[in-house]
Image (tube, helix red, strand yellow):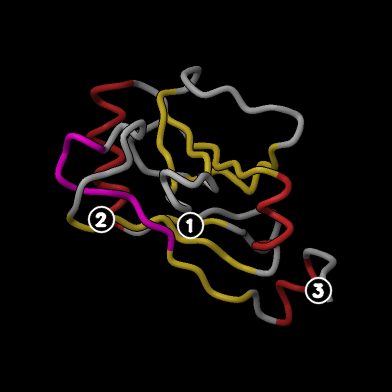
Amino acid sequence: MVSVGTYGRVAVTEDAAALLRELAGQHGPLMFHQSGGCCDGSAPMCYPVGMFMTGPSDVKLGTLEVEGIDPIEFFMSESQFEYWKYTHLTVDVVPGRGAGFSVESPTGKRFIIRSRMLNDAELEYFGLS
């Protein structure tokens, strides 16, 4: 689970954490960018650090802490964040083919996002109430 102070915006399931440990062993430190593109839908894209360059219009939602590997920063574009700012995101994994540029693509698994609305305490914490 990720925390920013008391509350976090992103988390990771144990199944996704296991795949991330495997991928980090192959590729080194990782990062996520939540895709909003037409080709990949809105898939969480996982890259080796340095293979995807974030810019000034990207928002860092948090850092995933997965035991045994380097922390994984999670980003999304500012324009997409405007639509998702009231949600908490959890990175999970399911069987299937990952998006073409995401490192899990050859594993037969793909990362997905499970989301829920922020609760009242989280909304207040993030200044959204």
Marks 2 and 3 sit apart, C-alpha to C-alpha, by: 31 Å
Q: What residue type is labelled 2?
A: Asp
Q: Where is residue 64 in the image (x, y as percent from the top left)?
A: 49, 45
Label 3: few (<14), some or many (≥20) within 10 Å?
few
The residue that appears at 27% across and 44% down in the rendered structure is 98
Marks 1 and 3 sit apart, C-alpha to C-alpha, by: 19 Å
* Residue located farthest toward the front when viewing the structure as drawn: 38
Identify the mark nearer the N-term, 2 or 3: 2
Task: Left or right? Give the position of 26 relative to 75.
Answer: left
Tell me where residue 106 sits by quadrant. top left
**Is 38 rendered above or below residue 126?**
above
Q: Give the range drawn in magenta.
A: 105-113
> Disc 1 vs disc 3: Cβ atoms closer than 8 Å?
no
Q: Where is residue 113 in the image (x, y as percent from the top left)?
A: 43, 59
Q: Which of 50 and 73 is in front in this view?
A: 50
Write down the residue under mark 1. Answer: 11
The residue that appears at 62% across and 68% down in the rendered structure is 87
Q: Position of residue 54 (x, y in %)?
A: 63, 28
